[in-house]
Amino acid sequence: MAASIDGLFEFVIVDGNRENDPWNVIDGYLSGGEFRFFGCTVMPGPQLKQAIPYSKKIRTEYPDIVIIWGGYFASNQYKTALDSGFVDFIINGQGDHAFPALLKNLSNDERDLKSIHNLMYKEGSEIVITHKEFISDQDNLPRLPYEKLDSFYPLSGYLKKTFLGKRTAAYHASFGCPFTCSFCAVVPIYNARWRGKSAQTVYEDVLYLIKEHGADAVEFHDNNFFVNEKMVVEFSKLIKPHNIEWWGEGRIDTINKYSDDSLQLMRESGCKMIFFGAETGNDEILKKMDKGGTQTSQQIKDFAARMKRFDIIPEYSFVLGIPLDTEQEVNAQIDSDIAFIKEIKEINPNTEVIIYLYSPVPTEGSELYEKVKEAGFAFPEKLEDWLNPDWENFDLRRNPLTPWLKPYMVDKIQGFETVLNARFPTVSDLRITNDQRKIMKQLSSFRYKNNLYRRPYELKVLQKVWLKYRRPEIEGFEMEVS
């Protein structure tokens, strides 16, 4: 967003993760009377704890400030946000053109808002949703103004120690995804569209971070980094001489089409781990999830074995607790997926496993979401209700609030997860010593072998108190290093 208005408008950046008291900083800027607009990226979960109260406070204390939201939460929960009375506009998806166009329009008092693509706002009591623009050519967008960001927050603070490297950078090489999974928040925003930067552009940006800021690893946080094999191969060739480690997110059925030569080159270039949505070992449920593509349970197993050959760690996520016709069917499917996960671990013990509880996503018209509504699930109608801790846990897929998933099922899933994580401690946590890993494995082996997942208190004590065990699906790779 800074890149889209750099040179057009004067702006400041406030990073809520880098400030001890973000509101004090925001209030300091607004109290000077120099600013007309407040833009806020809003993701589900912890970001809401700042976005909602700060926006509401701005509306109260600075009523003339125009408040603009963007991000997955804003686009997916647009009605609740716009009805709150303290969100004026929502950038619906990509904002590289919409954001500067909106600022120009409002600054010139033109009010020709319907001509701006990717915009949501209220006109009287009606919500207006303008035309959705196809994702822009990423190579033609303004280059990211790292120097500008560095003037507000030293870039060194963003290059953290991870299991990939001592100074790991985060980067987006593409936007969107060409698939329509009914549980994914990306789908309603990009409508099964994907567009990426060229390998040369990605390489030049990463090389800048290496040479100017000492980056020695990269996390590609694209929704789907590996859509284009040719681009990935070309990037791998370019980055290989620089001896960095890298990670990205992809699909099993996409990367399984890659040649052995491509996979070998990726590993030689530093690709250490890839995140995949395995989701379930049930082919029928994969269809209900509208997973798209050709992914099957057998392919998930075969691919884990293939990744082992190339020494690339597959990071499989599974979604447990989706709605089925009866309580017995839901419980049986949980047992089936637990058995499937253990089978994956037999095939490739290095497979990292992340378990989510199914959380509905408002993908209107999908078979899964229609079943969710029939079961009586509903999102909050008032924006402030999202600040309830239960809904924060919902967004982190820790507390589903879904009527079909009973407490004993949640206990079973979380108990299995505790035992699994103790039996196979994640490689991404550098704080766990080899001796600590051995102790956890020994203590959990009997439970794991005999499917005893109820009340694993002894393992939770180790993970929470002794090891302060981290959750990679919530915390990412970043280490807390003293």
Image (cartoon, rainbow, N blue to C red):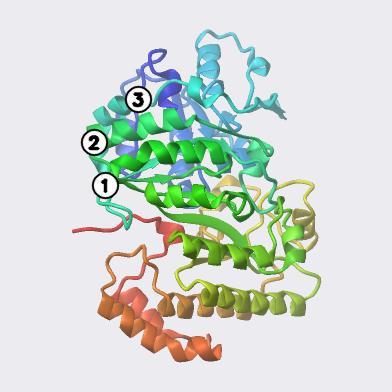
The Cα atoms of the two marked residues, 2 and 1, are separated by 9 Å
Which of discs 1 and 3 lies nearer the camera? The answer is 1
**Residue 17's spot in the image, x, y percent?**
34, 45
Q: Which mark is residue 167?
A: 1
Tell which of 435 and 332 is nearer to you.
435
Badge 2, how many Cα within 10 Å: few under 14, some, many 20+?
Answer: some
**Residue 140's spot in the image, x, y percent?**
50, 19
Quadrant assignment for the N terminus: top left
Q: Quadrant of residue 280?
A: bottom right
Tell me the SS state at disc 1: loop
Determine whether 335 is above or below 78 in the image: below
Q: Amino acid at mark 3?
A: Pro
The Cα atoms of the two marked residues, 1 and 3, are separated by 19 Å
**Residue 180's spot in the image, x, y percent?**
70, 46
**Mark 2–mark 1 CB contact (< 8 Å):** yes
Give the left or right position of residue 456, taking residue 176 as reference.
Answer: left
Determine whether 460 is above or below 299 in the image: below
Residue drawn at the location 52% of the way across and 75% of the way down: 345
Residue drawn at the location 46% of the way across and 24% of the way down: 65
Badge 1, how many Cα within 10 Å: few under 14, some, many 20+?
Answer: many
What residue is disc 2 on?
213
The Cα atoms of the two marked residues, 2 and 3, are separated by 14 Å
Q: Amino acid at mark 2?
A: His
Tell which of 438 and 65 is nearer to you.
438
